[in-house]
Image (cartoon, rainbow, N blue to C red):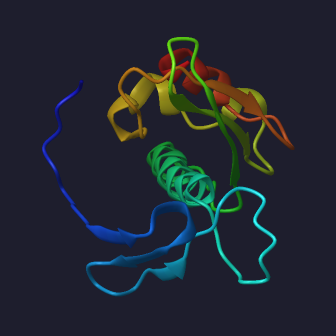
Amino acid sequence: MRRINPIYTTSVVVTVGRQGHAVSDDGVLDLQIGTLGTRSGVPATNPEQLFAAGYAARFQSAVMSAAREDGKDASASTVTPDVSLGKLESGGFGLTVVLAVAIPNMAYDSGPSVGGRRPSALPLLAGDSRQHRCGGLRSAMSRVGSLVG
């Protein structure tokens, strides 16, 4: 496992697991949690959706930061994660993440050098194998894919 020097730490209290409630330590996050495919009529999100939103937000911030350092504007970029929950061959469950990254108005070869120049800026999970694909307009994500794939 990789060790980090934390620059931010947060805490969220969850009650009743996948059919419960989550509240962050600052009270900003306060929502119902539901199971996959729940149709109970109560608006709820599932943990995989929360993970996808957080991971994509952090990844896109790294892309925009790298673009700024290259003198480019990636503010119109989008990051769409497909987060899958599944059974592991060794037993138990795991997550996989496939990112689709689109950077409009930026040619494939002129995208930010995210993988080559800023590997520490990318949100990585130790021991996680991911695939990255380009979505929408092509971007410089092949360089990122070689870093984190």
Residue at horizontal 26 percent and vertical 79 percent from the top? 25
Is residue 140 rendered to the left or right of residue 15?
A: right
Residue at horizontal 66 percent and vertical 31 percent from the top? 140
Q: Quadrant of the N terminus?
A: top left
Between 109 and 29, the one lying in front of the other is 29
Between 40 and 30, the one lying in front of the other is 40
Q: Position of residue 122 (x, y in %)?
A: 43, 38
Q: Is residue 128 above or below residue 23?
A: above
Q: Position of residue 26 (x, y in %)?
A: 28, 84
Q: Is residue 116 above or below residue 64?
A: above
Is residue 51 rendered to the left or right of residue 98?
A: left
Q: Is residue 2 above or below residue 68?
A: above
Q: Position of residue 88 (x, y in %)?
A: 57, 20
Q: Position of residue 22 (x, y in %)?
A: 43, 75
Between 112 and 22, the one lying in front of the other is 22
Residue at horizontal 39 percent and vertical 33 percent from the top? 118
Q: Quadrant of residue 24?
A: bottom left
Give the total of numbered labels.
Answer: 0
Q: Residue furthest right?
A: 136
Residue at horizontal 82 percent and vertical 39 percent from the top? 135
Q: Quadrant of residue 110?
A: top right
